[in-house]
Amino acid sequence: MAKLYFRYGAMNSGKSTSMLQAAYNYEERGHRVLLAKPSVDTKGDRGILSRLGVTRGVDFLLTPGTDAYVLFQQHRADTLTTTGLDVSALLVDEAQFLTETQVDDLLRIAIIENIPVLAYGIRTDFQTVAFPGSRRLLEVAHSLEELKTICRCGRKAVFNGRKVDGEFVFDGDQVAIDGVEVTYESLCGSCYLEESHGVLNNRRREPAERGRSIDVDTHEANPPIESAPACPPASSPSLP
């Protein structure tokens, strides 16, 4: 039985690059793959855009209401007709933007059709809250693999900070594709808390028993227990 793989990481962890490399590896050995991504991701239009400058068009887009299983089967049939080859794998970029139903469709493709599905995406948004697609993938994927990158301090980055005009922001819609005005920076937990003044998930799930908000001054000599210490400078960037 084939498996559903979820390869996740913070921004700039090489997810799209890894996906394009996987596609190349399949095709170099004479196999045929299909590439897809959610239509919500407008970066690169109908293509996969890696930060190394490598681009490749997708075979189909997944709109929020699309039945991923049916659409895959249609493109699989077209591939078999035009090339005489069956599809060996389905690769999905920006999988965090999928609906939960579409993630379930990916699982069905792997199990019922016996075709490996490799999904790539980020785990949480700029408020440290899981995307619906990522949450479902973490629940049902056969294999989870973290793609690592580093924070500005040299530690492993696990969160994504959003910047508007160069300043960190922690309010706003969950989805905002990076561009000229909106950019993202991968941060470790300590650097994220330093920038957010100790706030996680925009206080949407703040424990009621605290009865107060967290307002951290990261420059206090004796910061309160909620605050996170600033990251010490790293001697050399390294991954654990």
Image (cartoon, helix red, strand yellow):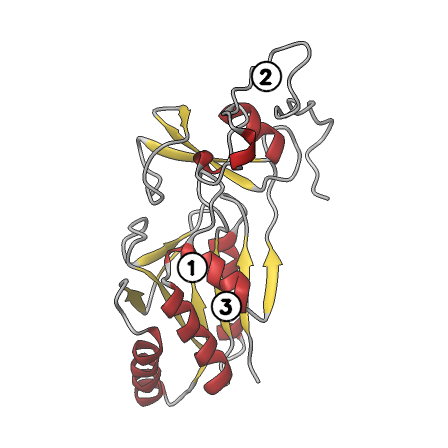
Instruction: Determine the CA span between mark 3 and mark 2.
Output: 40 Å
**The N terminus, quarter of image:** bottom right
Badge 3 is on which residue?
A: 118
Q: Position of residue 174 (x, y in %)?
A: 36, 43
Q: Is residue 26 above or below residue 180?
A: below
**The C terminus, quarter of image:** top right
Q: Are marks 3 and 2 in contact (CB under 8 Å)?
A: no
Looking at the rendered structure, the kind of residue marked 3 is: Leu
Q: Residues within 10 Å of mark 2 (few under 14, many from 20)?
A: some
Nearest to the eye among marks 1 and 3: give it: 1
Q: Is residue 97 above or below residue 211?
A: below
- Of the pair 133 and 240, the residue shown nearer to us: 133
Mark 2: secondary structure: loop
Q: Residues within 10 Å of mark 3 (few under 14, many from 20)?
A: many
Q: Is residue 213 above or below residue 1?
A: above
At a point 27% along the width and 53% down the height, the residue shown is: 45
Looking at the rendered structure, the kind of residue marked 2 is: Thr
Quarter of the figure with residue 184? top left
Badge 1 is on which residue?
A: 133
- Of the pair 21 and 200, the residue shown nearer to us: 200
Q: Is residue 124 left or right of residue 231?
A: left
Q: Position of residue 134 (x, y in %)?
A: 47, 57
Q: Is residue 195 above or below residue 73?
A: above
